[in-house]
Amino acid sequence: MKILTRVVFAFALGIFVQFSYAQEPVKAHNTESLKKEAFNLYQQRKYDEALKLAQRILQIKEKEFGSQHLEYASALADLATIELASGKMKSGEKTMRQAISIYESKTDLTKEKALELAEIFELIGFMKYRNEKPKDAVAEYRHALELKEKYTGTESIETSNTLWHLGNMYLAAGDYQSSFVFYERVVKIRSNEMASFGFDEVNDAVKRYECVAGKSKNQPQASALIRLTEEKIDKFFGQNVKHGGILNGIAINLVKPPNRSYGKSAKPWGTVEVQITIEETGRVIFACARSGYEPFYLASEEAALKSTFSPTWVDGKRVKVSGIIIYNFAP
C-alpha cells in the first residue's frame, strides 16, 4: 500500500495543480488562499489537514454554485485526489465518480473542462492499473481517449499521450496486436510534432513500435514508417542512433538468462534475438525479444537490460547504439 500511495501521489499531483489553479474567481467566497494552503499541505503529505481544507472548499463551492455546477465538480476532483494520495482508494474513487457524473451531465463542455474530465478518467485508470486490474484500467483510459479525440482531435499531442499509455498497457498484457495499433498512431503524431517532444520520447516510441511490430508479425507493414521516422529524427534532432548489428562480442558484461524449468511441454532449448538500445554510457535502456522461442522472451529481455557495453564514439562524441543480442538456450 505504501508503494501504491507514493505512485498515486506522484501522478495525482499534476491533477490537483490543474484543478486547484484553473478555477474561475469566486465572488462571495474567495477560496484561492484555502486552495493554496491545501496544496501546500498536500505537497508535504499532510493529508488529514489537506482533506479538511478540501472539504471546506467543497462546502463553499456548493453554497456558491450548487451541487451540479462544474465548479463543484472540480472541487470534488481535488478532494478525491487527496483521498487517493492518502490511500483511501474506495472513497477517492467514489468521489471521482461523483465528479464525473456532473461533468457528463453537461452538454456544453469547453475544451478545458473536457480535458479535466479526461484527466479524471486517467487517474482512475492509473489507480486500477496499479491495483492489478488492467481491463478496468484500459476502459478508463479509453474514456479519456474518446474525450481527447473529440475535443483536441485525433492527431493532437493530448491524444498521443493517452494512446501511449494504452499502448504500454497492452504491451505489458502481451496483446501485441492492440499495442501495435496504438503505438503506430503515437509514432505518426510524434514524428509530425517533433518540436513538442524530445529526442528520447520520439525515439522510444519508434523502438516500442518496432518491437511490437515484430511480435505481432506486422514488421513489413511497419518498416516504411519506422525508416521515415528515423530519418526525421536524425534531421530534426541532429542525433543519431548507430546501428551496430549483432552486439554479443562487444559487451563488457553480457548477462545470460537464468536456467529455468518450463515444464515437460516446453522444449528447454532454442534461440532468441533481443533488440536493444545502448545509451551513451554503455547501459542498456531498451530491450525487446523479437524473434525466436517465445517462452524465453521475458528472461532474455531481463538479462539484456542488466548487460553493459563499452561506450561507442562517433566523430568524437558518444552515441546511442541499436543492435541485436542473440541468446542460445541449450538443453
Image: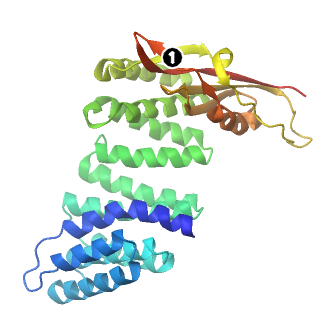
The quarter of the picture where the N terminus appears is: bottom right
Locate residue 183 relative to residue 233 in the image: left or right.
Answer: right
**Which quadrant of the rendered structure holds the C terminus?**
top right
Above or below, comparing residue 113 to residue 176 in the picture: below
Judge whether 235 appears above or below 262 on screen.
above
Relative to 42, is 218 on the left or the right?
A: right
Position of 210 relative to 51 (above/below): above
The x and y percentages for residue 265 are 89, 40
Q: Quadrant of residue 43?
A: bottom left
Count of number-bearing discs: 1
Q: Camera-side residue: 155 or 88?
A: 88
Coloring basis for residues: rainbow
Tell me which amino acid carries mark 1.
Answer: Thr
Outermost residue, top side: 315
Tell me: residue 126, above or below residue 184.
below
Q: Which residue is mark 1?
A: 312
Task: Name the residue rendered at 36%, 20% in the picture.
Answer: 239
Q: Quadrant of residue 132?
A: bottom right
Q: Position of residue 49 (x, y in %)?
A: 35, 83
Q: Nearer the viewer, residue 297 or 82?
A: 82
Q: Is residue 51 visible from the viewing direction of this image?
A: yes
Left or right: residue 324 versus residue 103 is: right
Residue 73 seen in this snapshot: no
Q: 10 Å neighbourhood of mark 1: few (<14), some, or many (≥20)?
A: some
Residue lying at the far left in this picture: please name it.
Answer: 27
Q: Residue at x 25, y 49 (%)?
A: 152
Q: Secondary structure at mark 1?
A: strand
Residue at image location 87% in from the left, 33% down from the top? 268
